[in-house]
Image: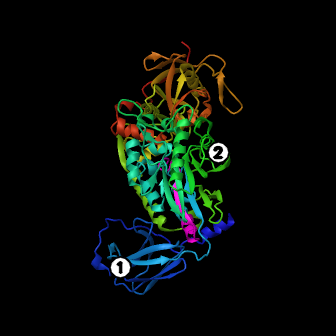
Amino acid sequence: MKRFYSLLLTLAVVFSMIGFIPANAATDPSAVGKPKISVKVSENTAKLTIKKTANAEGYYVYLKSASDKDFSQVAEIAKNGASKRKYTLSGLAAGDYKVKVRAYAGENLSKYSKTKSFTIEGAKSSEPKDIVILFTSDVHCGVDQGFTYVGLKAVKDKLIADGNAVILVDDGDSIQGEPIGTLTAGEANIKLMNAVGYEIAIPGNHEFDYGMDRFLELTKLADFKYISSNFNFKGELVFDPYVIKELGGKKVAFVGITTPKTITSSTPHYFQDENGNYVYGFLQDETGEAVYNAVQKAVDDARSEGADYVVAMAHLGNETECEPWTYVDVITHTNGIDVFLDGHSHDTDSAKVINKDGKEIIRQACGTKLANIGWVRINSKDGNISTGLYTWTNSESLPEVIGTQNAMTAELSKALDSLNERLATVVAKTGVDLIIYDPVAKDDAGNPIRIVRSAETNLGDLCADAYRDQAGSDVAIVNGGGIRVSISKGDITYKDILNVHPFGNMLTVREVTGQQILDALEWGCRATPSSNGGFPQVSGISFEIHTYIESTCTSDENGMFTGVSGEYRVKNVKVGSEPLDLNKKYTLASHNYLLINHGDGYAMFDGTPILQDSVKLDNQVLMDYIINTLGGVVGDEYSNPYGEGRIVAVEKAE
């Protein structure tokens, strides 16, 4: 690993990137001379010479490799044109390049110089190339985390410079999970994947979080190919089940597999027609045979087409709830796969599994958020297959620590700058203050008192309503501790909404009994009137808290709910206008933190059916409700800062 880091350090480019000139900047090309340039190549560097340029105060340098779609600004030379200027582009991988320069004086930009082409020769070696497959999975919009896409490109370029035949692929769940995805509905992520040079991807369950139509639009924006052997529309495959690439003189087939759990771990109605019939699917059945057969057919067809190696690209995972479609299930029921690249469960495990023919197959995963880059190496001499991870464990990203820069530096900075501008965009309005603090009461020090963790508020109502609306559920509960800031009367920006729900929890729905709902309310209100992060803000339900009754909730040594030993202090519970039926089943919406991960000790829902599993980010739930359902205006229905009376505290026995 030390050797790997030292190699990365050699990639640090000697230039520093200052910024960007807006595309619509007012310019006068005649105010500054057109630069003239020459290029001299030495090993993996290109030495750029810019001749004297009239009136120039500095220069922008633009570079394009053969695999890049467009030129990217890679440097600014903040020196005037009174003298000849030299500049070195370092750490370049083998390949063909084009470079051009533009001078500037104030806001005025010159015409571009003539484009110069040059070639960086590959590593001199008599040894044949190894095949290296780099893969990512579950990036979840973490484009500036871990290695970042800058570091990913640096690793890819270094492997190419060393003479390997390299391909970059993705195992799904790339375009969802952070504001850069939410606010562009995945488009910014696809453009970055294009820029870094992905060649193949498969859909994970969260590729569908912006809706089916949107995902299919995004696939058309992609310069890379999506594949899946089991994603279908009315029985017909949506994508090719496999693709064959020529690498290092060998034919390597990639077979795509998407978890059938997608229907419940995305939004179910995205897979339905207007009549509620499921028209999109993943060959889900009770036994798993349909998926096994589809994968086997794709493998056999690829072999018949001449594939020397078959690589499974899967989004299946290792979780028990994903059976019968885990990676173990698929490998043990198929043959002909040489190596199995997997995602979904965010693990980094490397495992050896015996396939249908008794052959040992390596399954490799690579975690999430670009903390790792997975690799497969096929040895050119003996065909031996090995796998592993490049790992970055620092809390700061790789480029922040070692200063790596390349063509992706400008692309990533441009995307993040655009995101920051977008966060300030006004997307809705509120005619009332939406509060988490009491608008009147103060503590002894004169500070406002936070009440969202002990009583109903209008923002609590709004957040719970959003969950119930977006899930289509009977009831919704949102923990008060997950509602972090108030929203003042007036304009609402994207940033305001993201600040309300900053944790990245995911909308989830379970089918529960009335008794379990009562237990949840009792548990959440056990400390009232004192503050408790698990206090339930609710929608579709109303109740009283008789605070004079001492709580009799019990818990285990880990603080998890175990029962109620005495009288319930929560009483007169109604779902809509009807009394809560303790034996009836209801659909309950919340987030995975509370319904799956036992957040705030809510353990009473274990074992109940999960109808929607982590289908949408909490801030996107609120955003979609305000913008789409409310039409962008939070109105008088939320005018009372203390809510509409869903939760009533009764302080004395009648």
Return the residue at label 1: 114
Tag nearer the camera, 2 or 1: 2
Residue 433 appears anywhere in the view = no
Is 358 in front, or is 26? 358
Residue 641, given in percent of the width and then of the height, sits at 43, 32
Return the residue at label 2: 355
> What span is in magenta?
154-177
Label 2: how many residues lie within 10 Å, few (<14), some (14-19) or many (20+)? some
Does the magenta-highlighted stretch encompass residue 168? yes
Q: Looking at the rendering, which quadrant does residue 34 occupy?
A: bottom left
Label 1: how many residues lie within 10 Å, few (<14), some (14-19) or many (20+)? some
Is 52 in front, or is 641? 52
Q: Name above or below for residue 312 compared with residue 289.
A: below
Specify the amino acid type for callout 1: Lys
Q: Residue at x 62, y 60 (%)?
A: 377
Q: Residue at x 38, y 38 (%)?
A: 626
Q: Looking at the rendering, which quadrant does residue 126 occupy?
A: bottom right
Q: Is residue 344 rendered to the left or right of residue 277? A: right
From this viewpoint, which residue is outermost toward the right? Answer: 557
Q: Name above or below for residue 356 compared with residue 121.
A: above
Question: Distance of mark 2 from mark 1, alpha carbons?
Answer: 57 Å
Residue 318, given in percent of the width and then of the height, sits at 62, 42
From this viewpoint, which residue is outermost toward the top? Answer: 654
Residue 565 appears anywhere in the view = yes
